[in-house]
Image: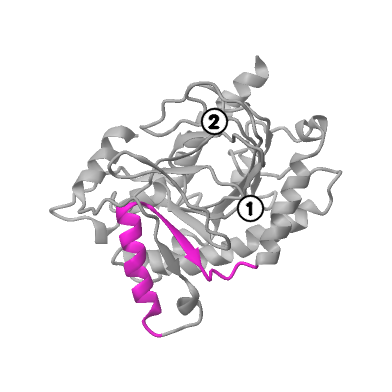
Amino acid sequence: MEDRTEVYLSARRSWPRQPSNRIPVLDLGPYLAGEAEAGRSLSLALRQAQQNIGFFFLSNHGLSARLLERTFGALEDFFALPADSKLALAADEGFTGYIPVAGSLLRNSYVGTNTSPDLTETINFMRDFPPDNPYVLQCRRMMGPNKWPREMPWLKPIVQQYMTESIRLAYKLLPIYAMALGAAPDYFDDKFDDPSVNCRAGHYPPLPASVDQYGLGAHTDLGFFTLLPQSKVGGLEVQTLEGSWIGAPMMAGHILVNGGDMLARFSNGRFLATPHRVLPNRGPEHRYSLPIFFQPNFSTLVAPMDSCTGIDHPPLFEPVRFGDYREWYVSQVSDQYASKRAG
């Protein structure tokens, strides 16, 4: 695989940018209502956001406020379980399940400097694949099966409904991304008809931090885009094109969206996979997060789109199967976690 540091920095320089320190808000309501030209205007706004800061908020997104409230509440209940109950669901090489506070260190970005474990505990849920799926049979990472606490039988249906509704929203956004990149609205259809989707639910308890220690270290996301419903406690920081870190404002009822590595590769670097991090939680309130990572089919060959390449923009990224890239990405966290457990 190519040198990620060099290719990402080259991509930042190769497309026109208007550096911004403000995360814009995109209104999805007119598009969902079927208003004429709403898709086109939304695609232009998305292009500006993804090309200049890599993050945007979605308003009127259609996800039920009641569903989000129930899902956050269920995850609070899970993380309040005794340690032994949570550790019974400990993540293994497949990376499905629970990782305790300081159980991993995320630092996959060219801006990451952290060397201390992250001050968060997480449980990773995958989109359910049938047991005869060839990648499940091959024991590929992040293919399940999911691990559920016996003490909370209601957690599974709530999380599954949240993931199902989030995937529906993600599919509604795909044509907007395609148009924003100068392609036909259905360009991504066959690349996401069996998508890899996971929810890495997180809990950031109030804890003292050492120097250069974070709730979650600086990183870029693995997938195409991430959906992050707003919680009650902030802490997320985004790196601007000028290199400064800005706090993502709290926008109740909105969903924060950001592009990941696969979007950067499809767009030949035109759309940013922006580094971001989570600060240590100084308290007194606890922070919870429910990001949905929307990713291509395991077998999709991710390569720069024709609409994003040409004489002035030669391909910057080597073609790569998404499943192979995900194996590499996840190994950076799961192998560290396995080493800690073995030690």
Mark 2: give few (<14), some (14-19) or many (20+) Cα within 10 Å: some
Residue at mark 1 to residue at mark 2: CA–CA distance: 20 Å
Span shown in magenta? 36-64
Which residue is label 2 attached to? 333
Can residue 311 be seen at all in this image of the molecule? yes
Dot 1 or dot 2, earlier in sequence: 1
Q: Furthest-front residue in view?
A: 284
**Badge 2 element:** helix
Pinpoint residue 185: horizontal percent, then vertical percent.
38, 71
Marker disc for residue 242: none
Q: Give above or below for 44 relative to 129.
A: below
Q: Amino acid at mark 2?
A: Val
Quadrant the N terminus occupies: top left
Q: Mark 2 and mark 1 in contact (Cβ < 8 Å)?
A: no
Q: Furthest-left residue in view?
A: 311
Q: Furthest-top residue in view?
A: 343
Q: Amino acid at mark 1?
A: Arg
Q: Nearer the viewer, residue 257 or 212?
A: 212
Look at the image and say whether residue 45 sits in the magenta stretch: yes
Can residue 179 be seen at all in this image of the molecule? no
Residue shown at 65% from the left, 65% from the top: 65
Q: Nearer the viewer, residue 233 or 48?
A: 233
Which residue is label 1 attached to? 127
Pinpoint residue 90: horizontal percent, then vertical percent.
72, 32
Colour theme: one colour
Q: How many marks?
A: 2
Position of 92 with respect to 333 (left or right) is right
